[in-house]
Amino acid sequence: MPDPISLAHVSPDHLLTLYQITRAMNSSLDFDEVLRQAMDAVVQLTKAERGVLMIADDETGELIVRVAHGVSRATDDTEDAYSTTVVNQVVETRQALLTNNAMFDDRYRPGQSIIMRGLRAILCAPMLVKERLVGVVYVDTAMRTGTFSEADRDLLMAVAGQAGIAIENARLYAVAVEKGRLERELQMAREIQQALIPSRLPVYGGYELAATWQAAREMAGDFYDVFHLADGSLGVVIADVSDKGAGAALFMAVSRSFIRSYAYAGLSPVQTLSQANDLIVEDSDSGMFVTAYYSVFYPDGRCTGVNAGHNPPILYRHEGGHMEFLARGGRAIGWFKNNPLEAVEVELQRGDVLVYYTDGLTEAENEAGNAYGPERLEAVVRYAAEQSASAIRDAIVGDVNAFCGEFPLLDDLTLVVIRFTG
């Protein structure tokens, strides 16, 4: 544990200087400005030839030169700018070191920088905040210049202590500012992403549509899309990116744009997902992929669906109350070219219901670690299937929430319900 700082050798004039320097350093929260002021203060007090101020890296603890005084460009930010022997000892002992006999001091073995530069006097002090090393202040002078006094050492320790606090305050302020900036950017990105999710589902004769989208984090990898096509049909997409967070959100936006663009171009559902798959495979090296189910609905109840590695939708038949999961098929988009996709044709009758969902729904967990599961989803769909699409959606979401209780969603949850009314 370091000894308490003593100002016994410091003159009243130096104390006044210390007060002025401390006030100047504490008047700014600009990190680089505080560092510069601290180094200028040390050089001013000690009348040193050279000096460096080093800051400890938050993660590794490695000392990094942030400010240098009297150091040539060739040695700036390198170990040649200071005596690593002295600095290492100060870091180890957490004590200031003063020597006016640098080449022959028996407290250490002089290193190459001391000998080559003919250094006579070295003064080095740790900057500590609650015994944690924030950085190190180092100054030296050559044989011809002079020496450092005990007053210089005591004053340097005082300045280093105040500089450590000022630097820590500036660092925390910079962290807070950066956190605020990132939060604002995340909020803006979330708003942009939400704008990509239909805020109001289109009206399509003979059908009821309802959907929900819940992000597990600030950003989501799930999405759904519903849009009119030029031939009078209706396109419905539900998809799930393999990751979560900002990266998945960007991948989601790209995937959505590709799928919608090829759909608008008049390509069939199989061609739409195939073309989107090949383009993503060609352009992306992130390792992400997206599962997707794309369906096209027609006014007479016909539906053409294509599964690209996604959870199979539930089909409820009003006539007879039969229920089934549609076939799985294809691989996720973004893995390999030539995705083996196939179209599935469904003829809907009045009262039939299709439920699309992502695995964030079936894999939602409660506090006991149990998953919601497809069987429970099937049961609640059967229970609510004779109601409107909105009521079916609400029944599913309500049942998931009741199952999970206070336990938060671990994955994004997206749900689309289509009911054919004829």
Image (cartoon, grey):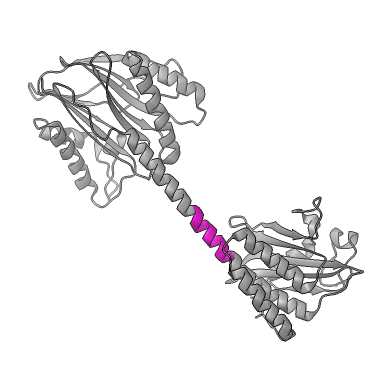
Quadrant showing the N terminus:
bottom right
Which x, y percent locates residue 203? Answer: 19, 26
Secondary structure, magenta segment, majority class: helix
Figure check: 66 above or below 357: below
Which x, y percent locates residue 287? Answer: 49, 30
Quadrant showing the C terminus:
top left
Q: Residue at x 52, y 28 (%)?
A: 285
Q: Quadrant of residue 54?
A: bottom right
Which x, y percent locates residue 371? Answer: 27, 41
Figure check: 82 above or below 331: below
Tally of numbered tags: 0
Q: Farthest right residue? A: 144
Q: Residue at x 59, y 57 (%)?
A: 58
Which is more toward the observer, 60 or 248? 248
Residue 331 visible in the snapshot: no
Which is more toward the observer, 91 or 414? 414
Q: Residue at x 66, y 64 (%)?
A: 135
Q: Quadrant of residue 144?
A: bottom right
Residue 107 is inside the magenta segment: no
Instruction: Name the side, left or right, on which 419 lies relative to 411.
Output: left
Instruction: Name the side, left or right, on which 92 lies relative to 286.
Output: right
Figure check: 349 above or below 82: above
Residue 52 visible in the snapshot: yes
Which is more toward the observer, 230 or 349? 230
Q: Residue at x 15, y 39 (%)?
A: 395
Which x, y percent locates residue 334? Answer: 44, 24
The residue stretch that appears in magenta:
168-178
